[in-house]
Amino acid sequence: MQLYTALALGKLVSINEKRLNKYISDSGYCSRRFADKLIEKSRVTINGKVPELGTKVIPGDKVCVDGMEIKASASNHTDRIYIAYNKPIGITCTTELQVKGNIIDAIGHSKRIFPIGRLDKPSEGLIFLTSDGDIVNKILRAENAHDKEYIVTVDQPISERFVERMTRGVPILGTITKPCIVTPESKFVFRIILTQGLNRQIRRMCEYLGYEVTKLKRSRIMNVELGQLRPGEWRDLTASEMAEINAAVAGSRKTAMDDDFVEKEVQVASETIESAKKIDIAADIKHDSKTIESTADKYSTRKLTRIDVKKPVVSSTGKKRLSLKKKS
């Protein structure tokens, strides 16, 4: 076995050594995050031995997953796959083949690929899939703020207040969503451009404002449009599209941490969490008149006074409501 070594900080190291999770990801088997899970479950071996997380692979090592050898990727990346897929409703964005209706079986690509991010099962539209673990990490980095555009249908007429609140940001998952662009398309339909990827973000934002999403389609990711791609169809990304994507992520570090993926709950400072909490206006209802200070709005503080409070009124949706008015 030929080794390429150098002396660094008094230790003999391999110049071409590569972290095991990156080696597996570069091969197109799965993402780095999923590779770590495989390693933790002892499903990976190097030269017949079970390694630990962080183990390095050097030229000549034989890496296997579940007994199947994983080949190193081509150094010039010519073997990388990049596709755009119009995910239909009902398809699950997972590489777990035992899950019925998984996205890998739905596409049926001849090469091993995995999705970049995800779309909820009830949602449809554009999603990227690739065999390139590095670009997955770069695109998913929250710091890169890449545009994603959605067409959303809700269950009731869209108001000016709804558009303004959605645009400014609302409290969900212990944080306040970043400002975004919201454009009404019709009485029940609007477009929204996000640079965030919180878990079920649009649905949660609408729910906070009393709306229910009845249809959600992603129409664009960065510079790539869904276009005329029909549900269930996929195509290779063009050279020009890939050039723009690579330019957009050029400044990103390659490795994404666990909290960079869409399935997450953002951790923020305690004072931010407190400011995002709804005021429980149904509490302490024995007082007919009580002044409270609302901090639910990030940008302003308002003093409100309860009036005629005997008991909360339960609406048709099951929500409790109290009558409030601004303090004079």
Image (spheres, rainbow, N blue to C red):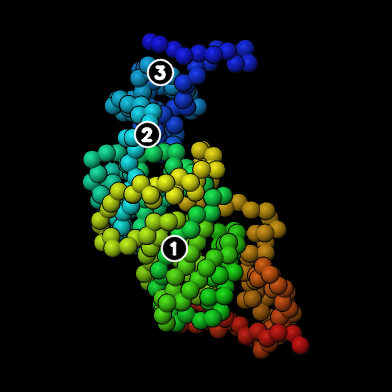
Is residue 212 something one can see in this rendering?
A: no
Q: In which quadrant of the rendered view does residue 311 lie?
A: bottom right
Q: Earlier in the sequence, mark 1 or mark 3?
A: 3
Other residues around mark 1 within 10 Å, as few (<14) / some (14–19) / many (≥20): many
Residue located at (43% from left, 19% from top): 58
Residue located at (52% from left, 58% from top): 195
Q: Mark 1 — residue?
A: 149
Circle 3/circle 2 CB separation < 8 Å: no
Q: CA distance from mark 1 to mark 2?
A: 29 Å
Q: Mark 3 — residue?
A: 59
Residue 242 marker: none
Q: Earlier in the sequence, mark 1 or mark 2?
A: 2
The x, y position of residue 243, in whole percent, is 42, 46
Residue 77 marker: 2
The foreground one among 52 and 14 is 14
Describe the element under mark 1 as helix, strand or loop: strand
Residue located at (56% from left, 70% from top): 167
Residue located at (47% from left, 80% from top): 158
Describe the element under mark 2 as helix, strand or loop: loop
Q: Earlier in the sequence, mark 3 or mark 2?
A: 3
Measured along the vertical axis of the image, is residue 229 above or below residue 302?
above
Circle 1/circle 3 CB separation < 8 Å: no
Query: For the view shown, which residue lies furthest in the front direction?
Result: 240
204 lies left or right of 25: right
Q: Amino acid at mark 2?
A: His
Q: CA distance from mark 3 to mark 2?
A: 17 Å
